Amino acid sequence: MLNTPRAALIGQHLGTIIATEDHVVFIQHLTCVREQTSCSPASERCTLHLVTATAQEIKVRLESTLIPSAELPIIRINVYHITHEGDDSVQCHTDLEFINRQLQKEISERELAEEKMRQHQDELAHVARLNTIGEMTSGLAHEINQPLAAIASYTQSCLRLLRGDEEKQARVPTILEQVNTQAQRAANIVKHLRNFVTKSESHRETNELSNIVRLAVSMVRNEIISHQIELNIDTQPNLPSINADSIQIEQVILNLLRNAIEAMNEVSADSRKLLITVGRFSPTHLFIAINDTGPGIHDDHSHKLSTPFFSTKETGMGLGLAISRTIVEDHGGQLIPSTNADGGATFTFTLALSGTQTMAQ
């Protein structure tokens, strides 16, 4: 109201900012408050003018209350800015109204900050997906090349059969069906890659967790084969659907799978095993656990794993696990790394069925 810094007012007597012509009114007001003899707090009101930092006078109402005390009594004064002439009890800004305005302002500012943070996280997640696809280029090219090579082989067979007799020509429709199947496979791979790398707002819908796992595995199948890794997927039956952004969850799974694949480069090929377990963690949460037989988590790295820009890889960006943790927590879950007793590491993350429920510690 006074356009004066808070620090400049603390410790000052209220009389120093009351208009000169209202000093008598103020003194009379305080006298009435002090002369209250009741044991319970009693209030007195008066109307006067305060002087702002720019020497302007504003009309206010004082409500003063005497609070009994074993030592010195306390006078608490509330000041209300009267914005219009008339009924002072109605046409003023109350403390509650002021608090509500401040709360609304703080809530709006917090919501804006949270929205900017979400946008920033989406940007980082998009960069990480692009980086992941860049690292997987060779494997993905092989994955796409397989159906294309099959299509080429099938069409050559069709051409040969069409030059033959009626019996051979009758086999063409069956082969064309295989061509169509492989074409759909290639199209689905390209479509999935496009969806994975496209920058878009987070979109949540009902999903089967096992299907998301299957899609993530399909993107690294060639790497698993080329690294001679034995893969097993154990999914508990009758799992409920979850409300989630499938691309973001797939990003988490894909990041953990590729970390596991790279970790097992340090062990002999005959001992490379990868186990993915999907199941129910609690009545409100499902979980995915990715278990490898690599060297495990080094003690010096355990507390830094999810720190942004920390990486154990020479060319790593250090964003993968940090973004994964953010995505998991945004879905109401937790990301929990651990070292296996018999060697290797397990990364387990939980997801709320609702997609937002905060997990109990």
Image (cartoon, grey):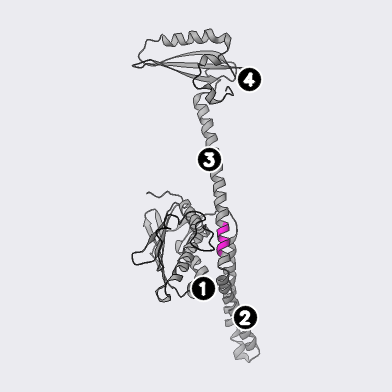
Mark 3 or 4, closer to the camera: 4
Instruction: Give neighbour class at mark 4: few <14, some 14-19, many 20+ (Cα, 10 Å).
Output: few
Q: Residue at x 51, y 16 (%)?
A: 14
Instruction: Give neighbour class at mark 1: few <14, some 14-19, many 20+ (Cα, 10 Å).
Output: some
Residue type indicated by callout 3: Arg
Q: Which mark is residue 222?
A: 1
Q: Is residue 220 above or below residue 56?
A: below
Magenta segment, prevailing SS (helix, strand or loop) = helix
Residue marked by disc 2: 152
Residue type indicated by callout 2: Ala
Q: Residue at x 46, y 11 (%)?
A: 30
Q: Is residue 19 above or below residue 237?
A: above
Residue marked by disc 3: 110
Instruction: Give neighbour class at mark 2: few <14, some 14-19, many 20+ (Cα, 10 Å).
Output: few
Q: CA distance from mark 2 to mark 4?
A: 85 Å
Q: CA distance from mark 3 to mark 4?
A: 32 Å
